[in-house]
Image (tube, rainbow, N blue to C red):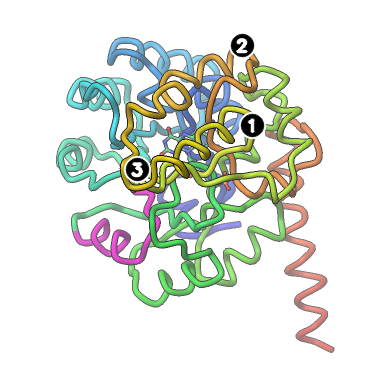
């Protein structure tokens, strides 16, 4: 399949693996890229720019296909050394960057000067238009269904994607709730030129996370995610667990008086405990409603091949059959 997204990033299939904290290590990105998608290393999971440089080198040892790095700008306790991370990306010869969380203007000129293609992840049409106006090459339009930070507008992809298609000139991928060939064809029908998946890629053989995380995704249904941190206007969609229920109780009791310090135990520093140690009640971790569509743990190659075969069958048989009836 050829779209403006496959052309932009030089990949075989219009499928991107979004940055994921403590999941997007070199093993994950390389597996997706080797399967013909665009794998992405999560920049800030690496503690320092030197660690990121090392992770990029490890990924290059595992694949000769294009891969990218995610740079997230979210409210965090200590501001990361963004110029250092950008230098590691440029010097590492990476050709694609996924930015997210906030306006990437501060890093864009450096990335563009180095010939890097930038895809900015946005949860609204206005942010997508802003990304286009400052020179991003593409956007990842992240609907309300998504795992992670859906923003505060709560517009699901059935509305958000065609709205984006009506307004944008640069290509975009659909993000949030994407799992299979049906998702891809629907995304293309709504105006996207590919799809970005987070949660689905965690339930793959190569995802470098504890087996309990993968089993939690298999066990979860589409009803098992919760929205946390809404009172802080930093909403995150996470998988329900004991810590999340405790966090939501604090939000209910404290109401508008809630401060980040009140929930620090449930949200700060929990990713390594969950993703590496499998301590599943350690805190809140991002997960999409798409968990309800995840029933197996294939390799990335099996997953992507299956998605492309399904998409092809839907287009050539089901849709063409309807059109020709
Ligand atoms: C465990 C997890 C961690 C994530 N961490 C990040 C992150 O650090 N930066 C980022 O931009 N997006 C992050 N995301 C969002 C994904 O890149 C992607 O946009 C999202 O998962 C898409 O929705 P889906 O889960 O329904 O596929 C994360 C998602 C998950 C599930």
Residue assigned mark 1: 241
Question: Would residue 203 be found to the left or right of residue 3 on screen?
Answer: right
Quick one: 69 or 235, which is closer to the camera?
A: 235
User: CA separation, marks 3 and 2?
Assistant: 27 Å
Question: Would residue 299 be found to the left or right of residue 70 on screen?
Answer: right
Numbered range of the magenta stretch: 118-133
* Residue 179 x/y as whole percent: 67, 49
Residue assigned mark 2: 277
- Label 2, residues with CA under 10 Å away: few <14, some 14-19, many ≥20: some
Question: Would residue 130 be found to the left or right of residue 144 on screen?
Answer: left
Q: Residue at x 42, y 42 (%)?
A: 229
Residue 272 visible within the image: yes
Q: How many numbered marks have been drawn onto this rendered protein structure?
A: 3
**Pointer 1 with pointer 3, Cβ within 8 A:** no
Which quadrant would residue 254 be assigned to in this image?
A: top left
* Residue 30 x/y as whole percent: 55, 25
Residue assigned mark 3: 100
Determine the secondary structure under disc 1: loop
* Residue 17 x/y as whole percent: 53, 39
Q: Which is nearer the N-term, disc 3 or disc 2?
A: 3
Q: Report the mark closest to the observer, 3 or 2.
A: 2
Q: Is mark 3 within 8 Å of ligand 1?
A: yes
Quick one: 240 or 128, which is closer to the camera?
A: 240
User: CA separation, marks 1 and 3?
Assistant: 26 Å
- Does residue 130 belong to the magenta stretch? yes
């Amino acid at each position: 399949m050829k779209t403006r997204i496959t052309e932009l990033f030089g990949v075989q299939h219009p499928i991107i693996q979004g940055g994921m904290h403590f999941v997007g290590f070199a093993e994950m990105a390389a597996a997706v890229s080797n399967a013909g998608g665009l794998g992405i290393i999560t920049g800030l999971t690496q503690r320092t720019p030197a660690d990121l440089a090392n992770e990029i080198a490890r990924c290059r040892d595992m694949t000769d296909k294009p891969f990218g790095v995610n740079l997230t700008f979210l409210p965090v306790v200590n501001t990361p050394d963004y110029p250092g991370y950008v230098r590691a990306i440029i010097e590492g010869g990476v050709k694609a960057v996924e930015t997210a969380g906030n306006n990437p203007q501060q890093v864009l000129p450096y990335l563009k000067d180095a010939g890097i293609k930038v895809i900015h992840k946005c949860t609204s049409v206005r942010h997508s238009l802003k990304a286009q106006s400052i020179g991003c090459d593409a956007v990842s339009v992240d609907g309300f269904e998504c795992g992670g930070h859906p923003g505060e507008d709560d517009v699901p992809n059935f509305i958000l994607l065609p709205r984006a298609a009506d307004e944008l000139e640069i290509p975009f991928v659909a993000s949030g709730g994407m799992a299979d060939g049906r998702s891809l064809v629907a995304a293309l029908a709504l105006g996207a030129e590919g799809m970005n998946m987070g949660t689905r890629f965690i339930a793959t053989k190569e995802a470098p996370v504890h087996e309990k995380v993968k089993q939690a995704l298999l066990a979860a249904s589409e009803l098992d995610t919760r929205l946390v941190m809404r009172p802080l206007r930093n909403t995150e969609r996470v998988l329900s667990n004991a810590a999340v229920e405790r966090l939501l109780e604090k939000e209910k009791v404290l109401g508008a008086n809630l401060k980040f310090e009140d929930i620090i135990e449930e949200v700060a520093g929990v990713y390594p405990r969950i993703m590496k140690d499998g301590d599943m009640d350690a805190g809140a971790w991002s997960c999409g409603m798409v968990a309800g569509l995840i029933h197996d743990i294939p390799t990335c190659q099996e997953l992507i091949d299956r998605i492309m075969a399904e998409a092809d069958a839907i287009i050539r048989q089901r849709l063409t059959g309807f059109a020709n009836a």
